[in-house]
C-alpha cells in the first residue's frame, strides 16, 4: 500500500434520546432539618409530614428548544402554592428533562510498510456536530428545587466535541 491510498470510513454512531420524565415537587427536606412540619416554603402543602408534595400546576407548557435550558426549560411561573392542607393539582411525570443527541464517527488508514507489517492511523470524532447536551434533571443537572431562583435551569453539560488520534502497528 502507498501512503496516499484511500482512507476507510469505519463507523457512524448517532445517539438520540428524549429527556427523562420527571415530577416537580415542592421544596424537599433540608439537610439541617429533615423532618420539617408544614411551614411556608416547606413543600408539605397538605400537612401530612411529607415535604415533597406536588404544587398547583397552572400549565404544563414546556419549550422543546434545547437553548431554553439555559434560562429555564420549565417555567417557574407555571406553578403556585396550593391552599394550606390541600393537595396540589400537579400530575406525576408530566415534564421532560433535556434531550441528548450525539454523533460519533471515525476514519482510519491502513498502510502496509512491509509484507507483514501494517501501520494503522485512526481519527475518531465524538459529538462531531458539537451539540450542547445538558445533564439531566436532578443532582448536578437541571435545578428542580421549585423555590430556587435557578429553577428549571441546566447547571452542567456533557462533553463538547472532541477528537482523538491513534496509531497502531500490526505484525
Image (cartoon, rainbow, N blue to C red):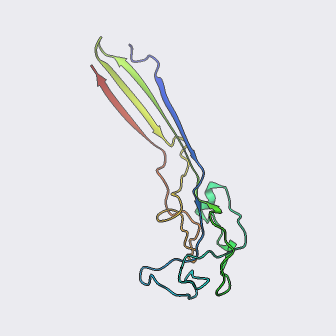
Could you say where residue 47 lies in the image, as x and y percent from the top left? 58, 86
Picture quarter containing residue 168? top left
Q: Residue at x 61, y 66 (%)?
A: 72
Relative to 105, is 136 above or below?
below
Asked whether 75 or 29 is in front, the reply is 29
Q: Quadrant of the C terminus?
A: top left
Q: Residue at x 64, y 86 (%)?
A: 85
Q: Quadrant of the N terminus?
A: top left
Could you say where residue 76 lies in the image, as x and y percent from the top left? 64, 72
Direction top: furthest residue: 115
Asked whether 69 or 21 is in front, the reply is 21
What is the number of callouts on the image?
0
Q: Residue at x 44, y 35 (%)?
A: 124
Picture quarter containing residue 84? bottom right
Asked whether 34 or 147 is in front, the reply is 34
State left or right for residue 113 relative to residue 81.
Answer: left
Relative to 110, is 43 above or below?
below
Could you say where residue 66 lies in the image, as x and y percent from the top left? 62, 55
Amino acid at each position: 500500500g502507498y501512503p496516499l491510498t484511500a482512507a476507510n470510513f469505519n463507523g457512524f454512531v448517532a445517539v438520540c434520546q428524549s429527556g427523562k420524565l420527571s415530577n416537580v415537587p415542592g421544596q424537599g427536606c433540608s439537610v439541617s432539618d429533615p423532618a420539617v412540619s408544614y411551614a411556608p416554603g416547606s413543600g408539605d402543602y397538605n400537612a401530612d409530614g411529607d415535604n415533597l408534595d406536588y404544587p398547583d400546576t397552572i400549565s404544563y407548557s414546556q419549550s422543546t428548544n434545547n437553548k431554553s435550558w439555559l434560562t429555564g426549560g420549565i417555567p417557574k411561573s407555571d406553578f403556585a402554592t396550593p391552599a394550606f392542607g390541600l393537595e396540589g393539582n400537579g400530575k406525576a411525570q408530566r415534564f421532560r428533562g433535556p434531550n441528548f443527541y450525539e454523533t460519533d464517527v471515525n476514519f482510519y488508514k491502513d498502510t502496509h510498510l512491509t509484507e507483514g507489517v501494517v501501520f494503522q492511523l485512526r481519527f475518531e470524532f465524538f459529538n462531531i456536530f458539537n451539540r450542547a447536551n445538558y445533564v439531566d434533571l436532578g443532582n448536578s443537572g437541571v435545578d428542580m428545587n421549585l423555590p430556587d431562583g435557578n429553577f428549571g435551569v441546566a447547571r452542567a453539560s456533557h462533553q463538547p466535541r472532541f477528537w482523538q488520534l491513534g496509531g497502531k502497528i500490526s505484525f
